[in-house]
Image: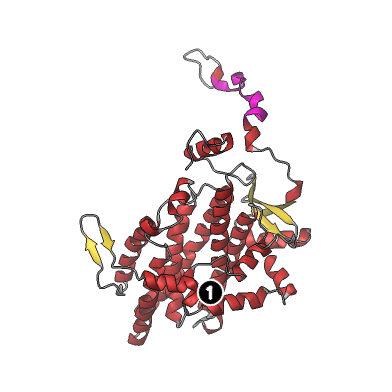
Amino acid sequence: MDTVENMSPELLAFEARLAKDEVIEPKDWMPADYAKTLLRQISQHAHSEVIGMQPEGNWVLRAPTFRAKKILLAKIQDEGGHGLYLYSAAETLGMDRSQMIDQLHEGKAKYSSIFNYPALNWADIGAIGWLVDGAAIVNQVSLQRTSFGPYARAMVRICMEESFHQRQGYEIMVRMMRGNEAQRQMAQDAMNRWWWPALMMFGPHDKDSAHTQQSMKWKIKRQSNDVLRQRFVDKTIPQAHFIGLNVPDPDLKYDEETKSYQIGEINWDEFNQVIRGNGFCNHARLSHHKKRIGKESGYVRLQLHTL
Amino acid sequence: MSENKNDQLPLWEVFIQKSNGAPIKHAGSIHASDKEMALQNARDIYTRRNEGRLLWLVPSNAIVATVIEDEADFFDPADDKIYRHPSFYEVPDGVTNI
């Protein structure tokens, strides 16, 4: 445990800067664990953007209209761009991109578990944009105030671009709910499958979260998992009800006093299974990524790094 | 743990001018092998939504920078010259337009 007596002058100065809400830049002095935590988080975030291109890429050739296809391509291009902003931010901490990708391939670095679920029908593209990007935005808006400058600035750019992602997803859901009975069923089915995984994106409850306390102390994280999850719940449920979608939670309650929804129990067993590699698509996502930029494919690798 | 392989293309810093007459501001960085690729990559990564009308690309290793630890010493000459600010001067009541 650090006490003022055993803290180095550099560490004291660092904590004093954080206390004043100063932003830390790459060349500034920082504790090794602060850099390590950031590298883990930013590279995971970058990998998520890139792996997240896969479930949507699956639908480019099957998009129902030319308009939908153009939009989907633009969204996927954004995700690639977001991956690059984030890899650049992580590189300022001294690890280069190919090392981060090696860590992903070796299973030492993760990506968001949400992308281990399949996009089965067109309504899934709606649900991904509306719910998955919606959840990501809540998290990323909070991270615009993270204490590490390059990460915070990448978040500002990403949030600006992501708001179109969420709206295009909601528009797909609106259109399907205004369509025929089969379309409404597809939309509800996508809602049923994506709702809980979207809530899991915020991570374990605060009391069970290994990294939250230290990350909050360092102002890497500005709000806790449960606070952000609740914000998403309260924003999103009225949007679901507005277009006639049911929230697949039998224990859902609305608290008139706090003007806030109380959700039922999250299935953490499922969450842990998917993290451990037992989700529907864990193998497919990673093996596709390895194949595209793996060691056997130097040309493609170079191209991807410089897209 | 795997090592850095130094297999990345050179790093460039991207500066964007948003509109005519505006300052040219740092936006981020990209990797590229030469000047043309640097400009094209910067366009594709940082200006997909008309974020700018002009790009500057600077090799990152050409940038000279101060460090925050030297802030107090380095900028010290500006600390004790408050007469450089207009608020330092007394203007009699009733005098306007100055």
View extreme (right): residue = B34
Task: Give whichever of A62, A18 is nearer the camera.
Answer: A18
Residue A258: x %, y % from top left: 24, 55
**Farthest-out residue, left:** A256
Q: Is residue B91 above or below residue A134?
A: above
Q: Callout 1: few (<14), some (14-19), or many (20+) C-alpha neighbours within 10 Å? A: many
Indicate the chain on which mark 1 is placed: A
- Res. B80 visible in picture: yes
- Left/right placement of residue B35 relative to residue A203 reads right
Q: Left or right: where does residue A214 sit relative to residue B54?
A: left
Q: Position of residue B84 (x, y in %)?
A: 62, 21
Which residue is drawn at the image coordinates 54% and 80% (left, top)? Answer: A58
The residue lying at 49 percent from left, 40 percent from top is: A2
Give the quadrant of the C terminus of chain A.
bottom right
> Magenta span: helix, strand or loop, mainly?
helix
Q: Is residue B78 magenta?
A: yes
Three-letter amino acid code of the residue under disc 1: Leu
**Magenta extent:** B72-87
**Tag 1 secondary structure:** helix
Residue at position x 63%, y 35% in the image: B69
Residue denoted by label 1: A72
